[in-house]
Image: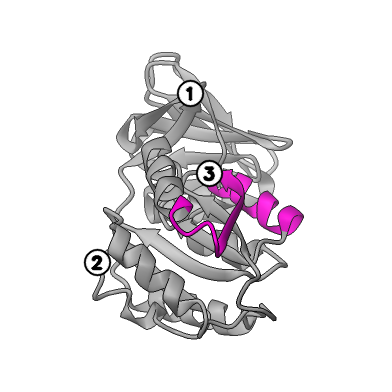
Amino acid sequence: MTSSTTKYRTLIADDEQPARDRLKKLLAEHAEKIELVGEAKNGLECRELIDRLKPDLLFLDIQMPGLNGFEVLQQTSHSPVVIFCTAYDEFALKAFETNSIDYIVKPIKAERIQKSIEKLRTLKQNSDKQEILRIIDSYISQAPKKEITTIPVKLGDRMLFVKIEEVVYFSAEEKYVTIHAKDGKTWLSDLSLKSLEDKLGDKFLRIHRALLVNVSRIREIDRHFGSRFVIKMDDTVQTRLISGRNYCEQVRMLMEI
């Protein structure tokens, strides 16, 4: 900002409508400094709005479907000043008190918003993207890994959480990833197959460029031609999946064939 009278063009991102409404209400009390230019309800939408609207200031939730707050910042080209709004432990986030990033622990209170608004004078407007990524990488490497137990699925205006233990496999086709449950039900996910593979670890195995299977749901493996395998899944529809040639070793190692 070049002038104390200039407003900060502001974007807010949170997957919970009540949280967005509360933040908007609190920011409205600072209308002389804050101009709300948009709001995002998931990480994918947030990423798109950041690069399209190029806000000066971003109030960003960390835990969002699609992409989390860290992934959003890693994938955008524009770099606003960032204030995380999160339920994470405040002591774990002390590293974010820098010249580029601030944080507010939920539930958000008016006095904490006031403190962040006052701090804007000292935060860099042209935030150093590399500094932000360095701080995020440092935090992620030190933070304990939380085991993922559910996958969020958006159904209209509501969010369904599918238990990982109920998932038999994920399949990808073009831009879409489908969740296949043991009872035969399917849902579309905003997450990419690569993202799911990274998040779920060794509980799921990539057997094909378009297939990620729940290891605990594999019932039987039979040899197929061309260095491939038929993988029979333990679900109500008795799914049979064919592994890709390039994934032969992964399957062999899993089953010690």
Q: Quadrant of residue 106?
A: bottom left
Amino acid type shown at disc 3: Asn
Amino acid type shown at disc 2: Asp
Disc 2: which residue: 89
Q: What crowding class fits label 1: few (fewer than 14 Cα within 10 Å), some (14-19), or many (20 or more)?
A: few
Disc 1: which residue: 157
User: What is the magenta range?
Assistant: 28-53
Is residue 145 at all visible to an observer of this figure?
Answer: no
Q: Residue placed at 24% from the left, 66% from the top?
A: 89
Which element type, helix, strand or loop, lies under badge 2? loop
Amino acid type shown at disc 1: Asp
Residue 52 at x, y = what percent? 75, 53
Above or below residue 169? Residue 88 is below
Q: Nearer the viewer, residue 237 or 74?
A: 74
Residue 199 at x, y = what percent? 44, 54
Residue 139 at x, y = what percent? 39, 76
The quadrant of the image that shows the N terminus is: bottom right
Q: Nearer the viewer, residue 102 or 207?
A: 102
